[in-house]
Amino acid sequence: MLHREIFVCLKLLLLPLHVVAQLRTDGLQQWPVPYRRFDRRPPVDSYCEAFYPFCPTGDRDGRFPYMRDSDIVSVYRLQTPVWEFKYGDVLGKLHIMHDAIGFSSLETGANYTMEWYELFQLGNCTFPHLRPEMFAPFWCNQGAACFFEGIDDLHWSQNGTLEKIGEVTGSQFNAMAQWVQDDNKTGIYYETWTVCSDPSPNATVWFESYDCSQFVHRTYRKLTELGAKLSSRSQTNYTKIYLYSGEPRYLGNDSAIFGQPALKNLATDIRQFYHAFRPHQSIFDLAFSLLEAYKKVVLDKSFYLYYNFEYWHLPMKHPYVQITYEEVPLP
């Protein structure tokens, strides 16, 4: 009798692992992997520091101004090269662009800018820190919406786009504002990469990015749902950064990988992979790291992706990495 009870207990303990394994291996895995939503935004770890403060002139609590229902609010498409304020059009020549939305109240004449971006810059959202006192890589990968008064016309129009694409009523704007606040509380982390099986139009998408342009697309769709009519006189292109791989293999979360002695080799390999992408390197170290990254991604055809706070292994394929500037029509 004792043996039977032990057997039943073991089956109950192993059942969740069996179910997860079946979902991962029996063809039931959903592609692309759905972006994980959270009940609330966690506090920021003091270890994470931004070179440029996040949303310095925006409301700290993410509040929006209330528009009168009768107001007419113009909607603007905004786009400029990443870090245009520092490097001008240098990244624009590579089609590495940042996207935002502008608003202008007819009744008050006030202008506003709304954008979604990294709390601690793009590099920290793309690759982790390797802290000596911690075995698991440490991520500073939160992203959030920023809403502030004013539109810097020169910043957006000089090397990018500032174009009116529609109008909404004050009540539609207020409904959108509530949606943005809810979206901002549940979508908390930035994801740089879009991962596909190949560059063809019919490729399988394994993972979707979650970045500034995706926020803009979601907001445009919400405005359309609320009754807005949006149109552009020019082609609406956006930046995407692709990785190309065969079917990804699920590895586990931090505690499953870095808390299990049996998986120490895998944990060490993940740390070694990210070592090539660590921040704050000297010129000499950076040159060596680029060679190391090339070996791992191109020659060894291997990449470790962190998505939904879980690790996946990507068996990389030609052309490995690609930056595109492709059209996404307005809804």
Image: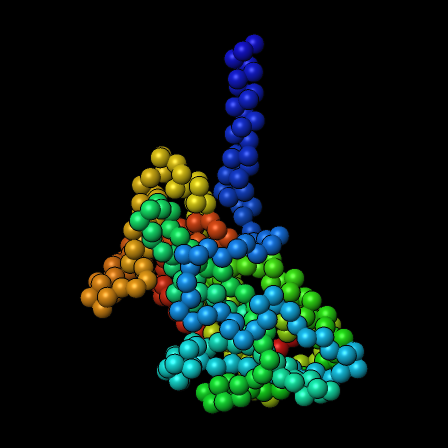
Of residues 73 and 148, the one drawn nearer to the viewer in this rendering: 148
Q: How many marks?
A: 0
Q: Residue at x 55, y 14 (%)?
A: 4
Q: Residue at x 55, y 81 (%)?
A: 78
Q: Residue at x 25, y 61 (%)?
A: 289
Report which quarter residue 172 is drawn in.
bottom right
Q: Residue furthest right?
A: 70
Report which quarter residue 246 is drawn in.
bottom left
Task: Give the colouring mode of the picture.
Answer: rainbow
The image shows residue 268 at horizontal and vertical percentages of 31, 45
The image shows residue 190 at horizontal and vertical percentages of 49, 62
Classify residue 46 as left or right of residue 72.
left
Of residues 311 and 177, the one drawn nearer to the viewer in this rendering: 177
Classify residue 237 as left or right of residue 300.
right
The image shows residue 298 at horizontal and vertical percentages of 30, 60
The image shows residue 233 at horizontal and vertical percentages of 60, 88
Q: In the rendered image, which quarter contains the N terminus? A: top right
Report which quarter residue 317 is drawn in.
bottom left
Q: Residue at x 50, y 89 (%)?
A: 154
Image position of 29 with respect to 46: above or below = above
